[in-house]
Image (spheres, coloured by chain):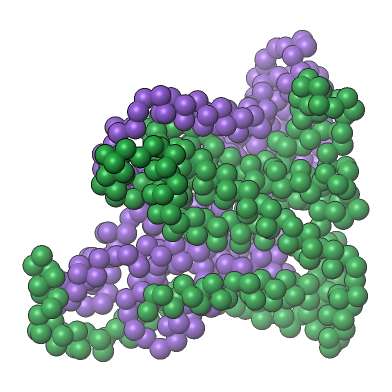
Amino acid sequence: MTVVAEANDPRQKVGNRRTKKGDGVAAWVLITPLLILFAISIVYPLIETIRLSFYDIRGVAAPKFFGITNYLRLFQDANFRHSMLATLQWTLASTFFAVAIGWMLAMLCSLAPKRTLPFRVMIFAAYGVAEAVSGFMWLGIYRPDAAGLLNVVLQTLGLSSQPHPWLGDANTAMPAVIAAYVWTQVGLPLMMCFASIQSIPTSLREAAYVDGASPMRMLRYIVMPLSMPGVRVATFITLLSSLKAFDLIYMLTAGGPVRSTETVGYFMYRESMQNFKLGYGAAATVVLLVAVLIVSVPAIIQRTGEAK
Amino acid sequence: MINKSVANWVTIIVGSIALLWMIPLVGVVVTSLRPLTQTTLGWWNPDDFSLTLDAWTTVWTKYPLLDAFWVSVKIAGLSTLIPVILAPMAAYAFQFLKFRFRRVLLILIINAFVLPNQVVVIPLFRLWRELGMIDNIWAVIIPFAGMSFAWAVYLVKNYLEDFPKELIEAAMVDGCGPIARFFHVVLPNSITPIAAVAILQFLWTWNGLLLPVVFLRSDIPLTALLARIQGQYESNWDQMSVAAIVTTVVPLVIFVVFQRFFTAGASTKSGSKE
C-alpha cells in the first residue's frame, strides 16, 4: 500500500526524470557483453551464409561469383521443393502433437499435482535424452523384421500379420520419425503448461468448487483459458526447435527412403557437407530463413509491441 | 479440494502414459545389461534371459568415457553460466530501460531463435580455423551461448512483463540507479525464469552433437563420442547402450534435482492438498 502511495507521489516524478538520463548508458552496459557474443556467433555467420549463397563453391576450389544462379537452380530442384513440403509437414505435426499431448497431460496432472509428480518427471526425462541417443532407442522399436517391438506388439494384438518396415516405407517413415520426435518433446510443453496452471490463483478454483463445478467443467472453463500463456510459450519453443531438428532424422532415416523424410535442414546438410556444394546449401538455408521469418516476425512484433 | 476418486483415476491414467513413455529408456538399460547374443532379436526377447555387467566394465577401458564426461561438464557448464548471467541483464534492459535501437535489437535477438544450427557451422568453422581455435572448447561454448540468447532473453523478458512495477518504482524513489535496481530488485525476484533458462540450456548443450563434431577433434564430449563409437563398430549395441546411459544420466539427475523450479511457487500458492 505504501509503495503505491509513493509511486503516485509527485517527488517520484522528479526522481524519474533524473534517473531516465542514466537509463541509456546503463542499458548499454547491461547488453554489450551479450551483443558481442551474439555478433560473433549469430550475426557474422548469418551475413557470411548470405554472402556464400551467391558463390559457387565446390570442395577446395576457389569460390566463383555466381549471382542468383544458386537460387534459380534451387527453385527448379524438385528435391528442394519436396524438402520444403516435408519441413512444413514435420514442423506442424510434431508441434501440434507435442503441445496438445503436453497440455492435456498438464491439465490432468493439475487435478492431482502431488501424486503425479513422479510421472511428470518420467515423461520429462525423455526431453533430457540427447536426440542422438533417442534415435538409437527408437531404432529397436521400429526394426523392420519380426523382432521389432512395434511389429511384435501389433502381431500380439492381432492387428497385423506381416512385419512392417516402418522406417523403410516412404508412407510410414515420416509419421514414424514424427512419433519418435514427439516422444522426446512432450516433456517441455507438459512442464510449461503445468507451471502456468499452477500459477492460477487457488481462489478461482475454490470458488468454482464451492459453486459445485465438476472437475471437467473446471478444466474447461478455468484451467484451459487461464493456462494459455504457458501454451503460447511452449508452442513458440517447440515450433522453432522442430524447425532445427536434425540429429533424430539423421539417426533414424538419414532423409530416406526416397527422400520422404528429408527436411530443409537435412537438405542443407547433404548439399553442403556431403556434396560439398557450400554455396548451394547456403542458398537453401537463406530460403528457409526467409520463409520462417515471414511466419514468425508478425508474432514477435506483436509480442514486443505489448511490452511497451 | 478435488474428490479422491478423480485423483485416483488421474493417477492411473497419467501413470500408465508415463510407463509407456519409459519403454525406450528401459530398452537401453536392458540392452546394456544383457549379453549381446541375447539381444540380437530385440532386448524384449524373453528367451534365454540373463544379466551381465560385461559391457559396463569393458566400455571404460575401451573408450575414453571419463575424459569425454569431463569435457561435457566443462562445455555444458560454461555454456550455461554465460547466458544465465547475460540474458537476465539484457532482458531487464529491454523491459524497463529506454534506449536507442531497443526494439530493433530486441526483434533481432529474439528472431535469431529461428536460425538453424546448420547456418552457423560453415562460417564459424572458417573463422575458428583462421584463429587457430579448432579443438578448443571455446569454439563450441561461444556459439552455444550466442544461440541461447534468443530464447533465454525471451523467457526472462516474458516473466518480467508481469513483474510488479511498484517494486522498481519504490527502488527508484530510494535513489537506486538502473543497474543497482537490476541487481537488488529484479535479479533476486527472477530466480524462476533464470532457473528454467539454466536447466534448459544445460540439457541442450550437454546433448548437442553437431557443433562438437565439427569443431572438436581430440577433446570430445559424450554425444560426439557416442556418435564416434556408433560409426566405428556395427554390432556392439550393449556398449553403445552404456555410453548412451552415461550420456543421459547427468541431465536427468540435474532435472530431477531442479525440477521444482519449474513448478516454483506452485506448492506455496495453491495450498490444495491434492
Q: Could you say where residue B78 lies in the image, as x and y percent from the top left?
A: 48, 57
Left or right side of B118 for A257: right
Q: Nearer the viewer, residue B78 or B244?
A: B244
Residue B180, x across and y down, in percent: 23, 72
Residue A257 percent location from the top left of the image: 89, 49
Foreground: B82 or B262? B262
Q: Which residue is drawn at the image coordinates 72% and 80% (left, top)?
A: A50
Tally of numbered tags: 0
* In the displayed structure image, the side of residue B149 where residue A162 appears, left or right: right
Q: Quadrant of the C terminus of chain A?
A: bottom left
Look at 57% across and 31% down and name the residue there: B17
**Residue at the location (50% across, 59% down)?**
A232
Q: Can residue A181 be spotted in the picture?
A: yes
**Residue furthest toward the top?**
B48
Q: Residue at x 69, y 76 (%)?
A: A290
Question: Residue B102's quadrant in the figure?
Answer: bottom left
Give the colour chain B carries in the figure.
purple
Question: Would you place residue A133 above or below residue B125 in this image?
Answer: above
Question: Do we see residue B256 in this rendering?
Answer: no
Side of B180 where A132 appears, left or right: right
Query: In the rendered picture, chain A carries what hue?
Result: green
